[in-house]
Amino acid sequence: MRSIGVGVVGTGFMGAAHAYAFRTAPLVFDLELVPRLEVVADVRREAAEAAARRYGFARAVGSWRELVDDPAVELVSITTPNDSHREIALAAFAAGKHVYCEKPLATDWADAKAMAKAAREAGVSTLVGYNYIRSPAIAYIRRLVQEGVLGEPLYWRGIFEEDFLADPATPFSWRCRRDVAGFGALGDLGSHLVGMAMFVMGPIASVVGDKRTVIPERRDAPSEASAELYGAQIGAAAAKEAMRRVENDDTAHALLNFSSGVTGSLLASRSHWGRKNHLAFEVFGTKGSVLFDQERFNEVQLFLREGDPARQGYSKILIGPAHPPYGQFTPAPGHGLGFNDLKVTEVAHLLEGLAGDTELYPTIPDALEIERVLHAIDRSAAERGWIEVAEVD
Amino acid sequence: MRSIGVGVVGTGFMGAAHAYAFRTAPLVFDLELVPRLEVVADVRREAAEAAARRYGFARAVGSWRELVDDPAVELVSITTPNDSHREIALAAFAAGKHVYCEKPLATDWADAKAMAKAAREAGVSTLVGYNYIRSPAIAYIRRLVQEGVLGEPLYWRGIFEEDFLADPATPFSWRCRRDVAGFGALGDLGSHLVGMAMFVMGPIASVVGDKRTVIPERRDAPSEASAELYGAQIGAAAAKEAMRRVENDDTAHALLNFSSGVTGSLLASRSHWGRKNHLAFEVFGTKGSVLFDQERFNEVQLFLREGDPARQGYSKILIGPAHPPYGQFTPAPGHGLGFNDLKVTEVAHLLEGLAGDTELYPTIPDALEIERVLHAIDRSAAERGWIEVAEVD
Amino acid sequence: MRSIGVGVVGTGFMGAAHAYAFRTAPLVFDLELVPRLEVVADVRREAAEAAARRYGFARAVGSWRELVDDPAVELVSITTPNDSHREIALAAFAAGKHVYCEKPLATDWADAKAMAKAAREAGVSTLVGYNYIRSPAIAYIRRLVQEGVLGEPLYWRGIFEEDFLADPATPFSWRCRRDVAGFGALGDLGSHLVGMAMFVMGPIASVVGDKRTVIPERRDAPSEASAELYGAQIGAAAAKEAMRRVENDDTAHALLNFSSGVTGSLLASRSHWGRKNHLAFEVFGTKGSVLFDQERFNEVQLFLREGDPARQGYSKILIGPAHPPYGQFTPAPGHGLGFNDLKVTEVAHLLEGLAGDTELYPTIPDALEIERVLHAIDRSAAERGWIEVAEVD
Amino acid sequence: MRSIGVGVVGTGFMGAAHAYAFRTAPLVFDLELVPRLEVVADVRREAAEAAARRYGFARAVGSWRELVDDPAVELVSITTPNDSHREIALAAFAAGKHVYCEKPLATDWADAKAMAKAAREAGVSTLVGYNYIRSPAIAYIRRLVQEGVLGEPLYWRGIFEEDFLADPATPFSWRCRRDVAGFGALGDLGSHLVGMAMFVMGPIASVVGDKRTVIPERRDAPSEASAELYGAQIGAAAAKEAMRRVENDDTAHALLNFSSGVTGSLLASRSHWGRKNHLAFEVFGTKGSVLFDQERFNEVQLFLREGDPARQGYSKILIGPAHPPYGQFTPAPGHGLGFNDLKVTEVAHLLEGLAGDTELYPTIPDALEIERVLHAIDRSAAERGWIEVAEVD
């Protein structure tokens, strides 16, 4: 059995999710290429060591450079804050290594472009962590759209709302900084929406958007929670002043025109009370429609205008073995997958791609196209009118 | 007990709803001023007679003029197609009569303005049939917003989708004609959304919108169904050619800025399969959020960030006596109101207003403000940019 | 057009519902026989007069005897408390009049039997107010079962929960008295369940049941609310002592064997917090299943094991014109009926039956069969074992 | 770090779930005692080898005896069909080893009793695989009940429906055999219900129940699927005759009296179309109620009669970090756990118990109490009356 040496940079929420997924994917999927867990890196050395111990990596290091330089590492997993992705990725490419990177690529357009350019030039494989598109429900919905079950697609509506910054009393964190996080909800949540839209519906041609920082300033306290979750340099910059201005959007929304002629809209917010992981979208076509909500991601609501009108209605389909790759996890329908299972599925996709058995999606260049749309929305918000996405270059 | 003489123009879907509501309101509400059912008018004389018989009106006539001129008629109810509202309303105002008119006011802006001007000058009372805003759930949600239960409002999202023109095989009807119907989904459904938004959230300052005719042409057959439902002149114009171009929008959507600083968005479509009466909206504020869906209009979903986080979630509130005016219909909670009950409530509101006990809303001038927003969306779609609503004049 | 003279006894919750329905049915249904609203009776004379005025009855009287004796009254509607049904019904039968009676028939088995016997001997028409079985959803479900769409029926589960006596602080009322109300939840709510079960699934052969008074005693205060709602003699018996023993069941449940071989179960409770009108039932068959909940009675959930397994799921069907008699109320699907519309449908059924156009169900003898099952459950609870329903005689 | 040697007997659906959970638990939980993956056993030697390879066990063997005798194995995990549990468990006890066994314990009462007796005498630790009770939602609901948040508990209703044998065309399998499987739905699904009921509500004192084999005979074909899933000796007995009589119940239901005075009911069926994993239960108390459905096990519906009646309704609580041990899996609320995560949680509980940090539940003696109730229901179905659970001995 072939194997590939893996190094994971970062041990926060996403670092743990990557390490877990590399460890677990071979238990669930029949992989041709299996991961060898080589190195974990974190500037907090003891965090790296704890993660290596827990997830069964061979070594822990205190710097990502050491990980990238390690000859046993063939694949570099980047889970550190957004402003560090570029430097790590470019070093990995320079060392001829494959890269698996969390989204968004970068905090600004130039960095994202540089990453995509370097990825293309390096000729290595890349994957960006849009894990939600790997769920069985999404694979099924994409098939419904592409096989014409819904007829000719007409409209796509997407929403991604959470409430982690809904409370005005929640202190300022790295997520509120333009330099470290880039966009706010638009980048953090909107990127998932745009990725989902493009995965299911194809490219977006033009947008008109708007953004708001609904809670303009926050108490400037060192966020220990965020330091713990997201690791590293952050949080350290604990402030002296009482209140600090939030530098990016809490809420962003846009109208969309897809290249196919389909129209649509999206909304991303991190301050909508009651929503925890409300990544929801709907597709309407000339023969039916489908509704999805990540908070109940083991279900799909499908309406088809077929047969007796008295029986027509949205069918609540419980995801099961008829919806690959659900059956890898359990043979029993309606038993449900969890969030971590999606990351496991993503890593299985990555390993299948690296083995040459499937085409990876979204690669770093694919992810640049997603971010091009985000920048178009941002620019539209500033210029107060429609923007052709291709104008962002 | 005081009474007021009522004449209803039109005997289609809405004509029947008005007649039913005038007959039924006094059974349900304790009214100071009760309706005297005087005249029904329809160009199809026998339809007028049948309606008069069924609903207990004293007389039937074959022309609306005769109804307006009838001295016993003090209140004129206009339920004919949109292109006839202006002429009938102006005649009623000239005769010094109160007017109860279906929405939208007119098929173009000039007519709508003329109606509002005439209404103001006539000094009579008016009400426009935005019946959905009269439901107990909406009264309750409005109170939640206005009393600050949701905190400072941040975002409003509204959707009104139906599927009555989702089937490409559905033939061309009067609803597809610019001259008879005015806007398509934007006018028919979007007007309800904008009315709801303004009723709950206050005035809208600026918009950017887009529109689509997703099924650009339809078989040109005489629609007997629509003739039956909406009566009169329509349908008669049965066409000769095979296919006919649809003249107005199937789908319209927009981003909104309210005068209060709240942002929002709306979508109206008559071609979204699976949706029957999906007038749904959501309000997010700094302390909570509320969700509403007309397809389940006896429920409200309320989230408040109060108390133990482990217990927080959307509460599915079943409308009951704690939500006036539900208790007028039945003392038992969770038993539910129906569509016709909303029209009855609207008529009770009208009669209370005419008795001087409450301020009527929306009057014809109020409805003009709603339509101003629709015209701003329409203009924005043409000009491809943001429009100040006040610029529509 | 033929008409029939109607007298309504009682002006409480159900009296109002009857009067409303007689007045409204001809507005909604095309009736061959229309009601003439002749007399309202209530021991509280002024309540009778107010009701007569509101609902347009010709006369008000202070005693039901006067109503029964009125030669213009051909149909007697009985809405007074359960312990008064027998006497009024028997007087009406003696006078050769048709009877429309609220359920349950009586507070004990002997009275119910006497009513059914007298009804059969009088040869007049009767109907008992099991209004929930008149909803379009139930007509549709019954058809699904009877036409074999669900395959061979296997199981029926029914629940009717409300919470109007869930609060231990709610005072003693007439509903807690064995002599006035008869059974508790078993009679008040369980009768609806059994009626629904028999309407959809056919006769019940044997039962084993149990009952509980979960709140054994209540504060003995005069219940003005109940006096207001249910009128008459009740409430008057306002007590002196502090607490009073509840004399009937708060909760009753049973396992069932239908004559067809189908098995099932039921639960009725008036003390289950959170439930307002939770009359819910499910039917499972060899080809599919159907779920119903009165709190959302404009919907039906239907599962059919047909076609692609990947698409199978419960369809949430919104009741509309494809589900008669919905279209009588509105031509637009998904707009919804309300509680009062069900009573209107029941009265239309009654008038169609009196006109000879349909067979009435449930007549008083039919209702006796429903109550036979309730008495079998009661006896089973006492005897602690299975009871053949036919043994109750 | 302390470790314990683990051997897993069986490689079917549950064998894989155990192996996965032992491998994954230390990634998710901070364990004092970690599993050493020593041996996998399956009569199909190559299946054992494949499982050992996939899940990282040191050795594979072709017989459970070899596993039990292996000195490195300290804990024996039993996932083979129900008729084999006793022999393996008793051998493990004889060897002084801890036992982790799937439910139900055995196919008859004598075997189950023997296992419990042997477990007590051996003085080792045991756990039975009632994994659903380990979910965060259940821990939360149990706390709500035990802390009196719902007031005094009044009623418990439980349902466990699946449709894996709903299709009459599904062939006969080992699950239909009394000797191999024991009870049908009553044992397979009803055991979970009774376990859940006792975990949340305490012991059950008496029952009256009934059972049905709704599809009395099935085509007798070798079920490859079941051989694949459940491994071993089964399926081999592929039959010659066309149809074979089903030997156990498809559906079982009962009324319950808990020792606390609470009443309740349960239903288990493996032939209810549309239900995939519908393990649903409800608790009603004097202050509120709670609803749970395993098909949406990341949610809890909670009703509390507190505060403003206009705001009361069932709250849909999304499980999150406020509901331990959810936070072990992800720090983000509403992201959801999957079925395999429950088994991981169960194994973590087992390891915590073996480390002496918590009291294990349900042990094999605890599970005997669950099965005592099942046997009481079975006996009641035969004797047609109420049975005291304690009479089963």
Image (cartoon, coloured by chain):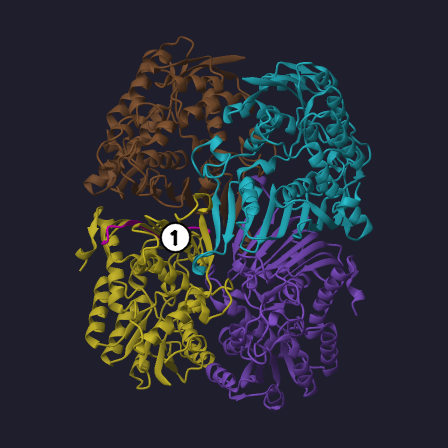
Chain colours: A cyan, B purple, C yellow, D brown
Quadrant in the rendering for residue D334: top right
Q: Which residues are magenta?
A: C259-274
The quarter of the rendered structure image containing the N terminus of chain D is top right
Q: Position of residue C21 (x, y in %)?
A: 42, 73
Residue farthest along the front direction in this orientation: B241
Q: Nearer the viewer, residue A306 or B88?
A: A306
Protein chain holding label 1: C
The quarter of the rendered structure image containing the C terminus of chain D is top left
Quadrant in the rendering for residue C231: bottom left
Q: Is residue C268 magenta?
A: yes
Q: Is residue B42 left or right of residue C389?
A: right
Q: Nearer the viewer, residue B346 or A64?
A: A64
Determine whether D264 is above or below A50 in the image.
Answer: below
Residue farthest along the top direction in this orientation: D71
Q: Amino acid at mark 1?
A: Val
Determine whether A141 is above or below C19 in the image.
Answer: above
Q: Is residue C343 magenta?
A: no
Residue B17 appears in the picture as rendered: no
Q: Position of residue C103 (x, y in %)?
A: 32, 65
Mark 1 nearby-residue class (10 Å; few <14, some 14–19, many ≥20): many
Q: Is residue B373 left or right of residue D280?
A: right
Dot 1 corresponds to which residue?
C290
Q: Tally the numbered discs.
A: 1
Residue B290 appears in the picture as rendered: yes
**Image point (42%, 44%), residue name:** D282
**Image point (63%, 46%), residue name:** A201
Q: Position of residue A90 (x, y in %)?
A: 76, 25
Q: Secondary structure at mark 1?
A: strand
Determine whether B261 is above or below A367 in the image.
Answer: below
Q: Position of residue D185 (x, y in %)?
A: 32, 37
Determine whether C203 is above or below B19 in the image.
Answer: above
